[in-house]
Amino acid sequence: VEDGYDLWLRYRGLAMVAQARVATQARSIVHAEPASPTLQAAVAELKRGVAGMTGKEAASATQSADGALLLVTPANAPKGVDLPWSELGREGYALRSLKLGGRAVTVIAANTDTGLLYGSFAWLRAAQTGADLSRLDLRAAPKLGLRLLNHWDNLDRTVERGYAGASIWDWWKLPDLRDVRYVDYARANASLGINGTVLNNVNAKADSLTAPFIAKAAALAEVLRPYGIKVWLSARFSAPKELGGLKTADPLDPAVRAWWKAKADEIYQSIPDFGGFLVKANSEGQPGPQDYGRNHVDGANMLAEALSAHGGVVMWRAFVYAPDTGDRAKQAFAEFQPLDGQFAANVIVQVKNGAIDFQPREPFHPLFGAMPKTPLALELQITKEYLGFSTHLVYLGPLFEEVLRAQPDGAPVAQHVKAIAGVANIGSDRNWSGSHFDQANWYAFGRLAWNPELASSDVAREWVQQTFTTAPRAVDSLVAMMLASREAVVDYMTPLGLHHLMGTAHHHGPAPWVDDLERADWNPVYFHRAGRDGIGFDRTPRGSNAVAQYAPDWAARLARPETTPEDWLLWFHHLPWDYPLRSGRTLWAELVARYDRGVATVADMRSQWAALKADIDPQRHADVAAYLAVQEAEARWWRDACVAYFQSVSGLPLPAGTRAPA
Ligand code: GCU
């Protein structure tokens, strides 16, 4: 039964011809002895993959024969073979088909065993996606040094914004009992090159820093270490008070500084390669340095000092907003940009892709490109808090690609960041992610984190080939569905730059009418500002002037509706309902047309999926079909609720040809 547990590492039997092609290239595996745990993991994965795909065993060997896979580092590379070591760095790899003493072999080369592990996964990916394994010449090295998952785990098996069952971290049983799932988690992440994981929620409980939890984290670190994955923890800023009995958590207080230093030393005793702390401070009620009249630099640098002796890093989040600033979208920039250049060398400021909060579409965050003296991390959300949870099929590759390629000031966001983090969508559901297609979002995050220049369409294709089928027509159809799905969710939830229209707290389903929450900047009406006169948030110089936070070219472009990308229109402008759009329709007619288009796309996705019944195993086909039915119903719900509400405000008749809400 295909239940999705194997993710994209299925290694199912290939068709006869392909089987033979793979088998002849992997008759044996030659590697250094004794093998480190990392090298053992690489060899085991190759053996597992070859056996699964071909039904034949690839045995370990000491001599290279025809069809051998050679795993080499500079220490055991065959003489006379010229390999691009200096380009591979610490984590990169090269795959090359060549003749060695007259024998046809494949070399997997890397400077480290971690590189060999990544290279082995790359070879398996090539095998599963039908590459010509007899003519390999690939090389790859990651562009970003830190590629992290952020788990929003609450230490009690619940996951904030988790839609895939209980947390995979079984804290009650750790450290003694180590679920085999942790190894499969490590394999899946290593196959993508993810090299760090923050175990607990950014809304952190101080408990994560107590001795029992450090021991549990250390047990996980032991499991993950061979796979090149470091463990990190979210740290609660007030922990010196809660755990240390201090009266204050003031970052300039010597006793507080000493407490953090001792805490860091204690952690590194158990986890010598501990990654560092992720911190959410003075945001949504979390404690932070501002509670003591200090700023983000004071807070981050204090933690940085505690970690620096051990090579640890502080990821300090820029997701901050407070009531009454006039425009919530402006606050992170206002608080952080003036601090550029003041953070310690081992602090990275972690910035969400957009200035509000993981909406179906947001313009890129104005901090990218605006803090040239501070290393930044891009934070993406893999779990679909605002995009239909795990029920809606939405492939996030295009969203990730859109922000990585956005050009704040001539260079893409990908070049303005040193690190990347994804809020994980992983839980203990059998299929890990709550739905089969949500696995693709984990996959796409990891692949784009490794190489931000990959096209999300290519990533979708290789995921489909490994996860579902290699039959070309089915692959094309699945990739087309996935690529259409992101625009569909934007259309049926928040077209034309609308944002934050969802129901309170749970964030599932439409509620554009809500206007009575305790904080103004939580109300949907605050964001859409619809009235008789029109709709949209004026962020031009006449309004909140958030556009001024962008580099001059963008600021000028975004200040005028005619030069603002239409997909962002109502994010930056408040416009009359009859404002003419490029389609020739009025704003009102275009809004309704986009809501309709979103629903129609989901209906198409459903029929495309139905037509693939013969290509997909029955259980997964039925699972996805059931989810798509829910998605279509909920897309209609979003459209009908939003169109009816905006109509009640605009007072305009439905454009001709529009179906009246049911
Ligand atoms: C969103 C989300 C919260 C989360 C917060 C964050 O507001 O709804 O659950 O804690 O983002 O990223 O800190």
Image: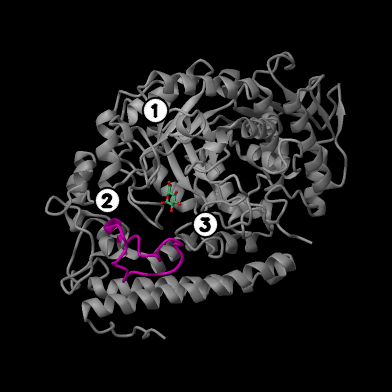
**Residue bounds of the magenta highlight:** 497-521
CA gap, disc 2 and disc 1:
23 Å
Q: Which residue is mark 3?
A: 395
Q: CA distance from mark 3 to mark 2?
A: 33 Å
Whichever of callouts 1 and 3 sits on the residue coming sooner in the sequence is 1
Per the rendering, the mark at residue 323 is 2
Look at the image and tell me whether residue 198 can be seen. Answer: yes
* Disc on the earlier residue, 2 or 1: 1
Amino acid at pointer 2: Pro
Work out whether mark 3 precedes mark 2 in sequence or the reverse, and give the earlier one: 2
Secondary element at tag 2 = loop
Residue 503, magenta (yes or no): yes
Task: Relative to 198, say whether 517 is above or below.
Answer: below
Ligand 1 near label 3 (Cβ, under 8 Å)?
A: no
Local SS, label 1: helix
Pick the quarter of the image with the N terminus.
Answer: bottom right
Height in image: 66 above or below 262? below
Instruction: Give the Cα distance between marks 1 and 3.
Output: 35 Å
In this image, 408 relative to 216: left or right? left
**Mark 1 or 3: the one toward you:** 1
Give the answer, above or below, for where 275 lies relative to 57. Answer: above
- The majority secondary structure of the magenta stretch comes to loop
Residue 118, by quadrant, is top right
Badge 1 crowding class, 10 Å Cα cut-off, few under 14, some 14 to 19, many 20 or more, is many
Which dot marks residue 300?
1
Specify the amino acid type for callout 1: Ala
Within-10-Å neighbours for mark 3: few <14, some 14–19, many 20+: many
Of the pair 468 and 311, the residue shown nearer to us: 311
| Residue drawn at point x = 20 percent, y = 51 percent | 326
Q: Residues within 10 Å of mark 2 (few under 14, many from 20)?
A: few
Picture quadrant of residue 340: top left
Find residue 72 and name its label. Answer: none
